[in-house]
Image: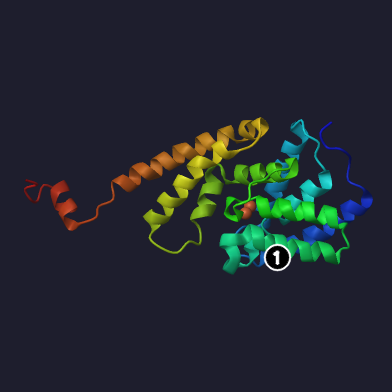
Amino acid sequence: MVFIRKLTPTETSIILKLQEFVKAAHAESNSHDYAHVLSVCRYAIQIGKAIPEDVDPFILSAGALLHDIGKTNSVFAHIHGLFGGSLAEEFLDGLKIDPDIRDAVCRVVIRHTPTSMIPPETPEEKAVYDADTLDRLGLMGLLRGFIGKAGAMDVIMTKYMEKRKLDYEKLHYKISKDIGLEGKEMMNAFIQIIEDRLKTRMHSIKDLFSKEGLINSH
Ligand SMILES: [Fe+2]
Ligand SMILES: [Fe+2]
């Protein structure tokens, strides 16, 4: 038994209130949608059920639901873990959550992303970090990273693909690596196709002339 208990009726009703808040916030966001949040919840529960450490189901579920709440404001997207931690604290305070539980949930939110520069420590923090990473593996996760970024397409793609290649090794649990293996392999194959295609891009009309044999390349 790795979940230390089941959710109480009170906790379930709090989780449903959290869902309404999170869903409404993500509906207005041009970054991650609520489907991503639900995927992260699903992976987090799968991981929580499989790891040997004790996992609190409320801290895990509330943390997974709130993990990207800071991303719903694009101004703070680059520090969305820390910003999300403050939003989560305010909201959980309003629901009169026990301060120790509230703080544990907020730490899950803060530590789910390397941008906060605070690595996850507790099983709930590590499970949500891994769950979020797992939803980035695979084709949809990769494409999501390309969307909405400003700048030259090849620069965005190269930068984002380099980051994604490192994700799998940063997973904390064996179960996370088992779940993510297929997605990682699919994503790497897709990255290879894009990288091969980017190599054929030309940077000067001389490249075109050389390619078509119109000038002497010597
Ligand atoms: Fe995030
Ligand atoms: Fe996320």
Residue occupying the point 65% across, 60% down? 82
Task: Identify the coloring.
Answer: rainbow
Q: Is mark 1 within 8 Å of ligand 2?
A: no
Q: Is residue 51 left or right of residue 150?
A: right
Is 167 drawn above or below residue 79 in the view shown? above
Is 47 drawn above or below residue 210 in the view shown? above
Q: Pointer 1: residues within 10 angstroms few (<14), some, or many (20+)?
A: some
Residue occupying the point 45% across, 45% down? 162
Q: Nearer the viewer, residue 119 or 52?
A: 119
Q: Is residue 59 left or right of residue 148?
A: right
Work out whether residue 116 can be spotted.
yes
User: Label 1 amino acid?
Assistant: Ala
In the rendered image, residue 110, in percent from the top left (x then y), is placed at 68, 55
In the rendered image, residue 133, in percent from the top left (x then y), is placed at 60, 44
Residue occupying the point 55% across, 47% down? 140
All told, the count of numbered labels is 1
**Image quadrant where one finds the N terminus:** top right
Q: Is residue 193 left or right of residue 143?
A: left
Work out whether residue 30 can be spotted.
no
In the rendered image, residue 13, in percent from the top left (x then y), is placed at 89, 56
In the rendered image, residue 91, in percent from the top left (x then y), is placed at 79, 65
Q: Nearer the viewer, residue 71 or 184?
A: 71
Q: Which residue is denoted by mark 1 in the rendering?
A: 25
Q: Is residue 57 left or right of residue 22?
A: right
Which residue extends farthest right?
9
Q: Which element carries disc 1, helix, strand or loop?
A: helix
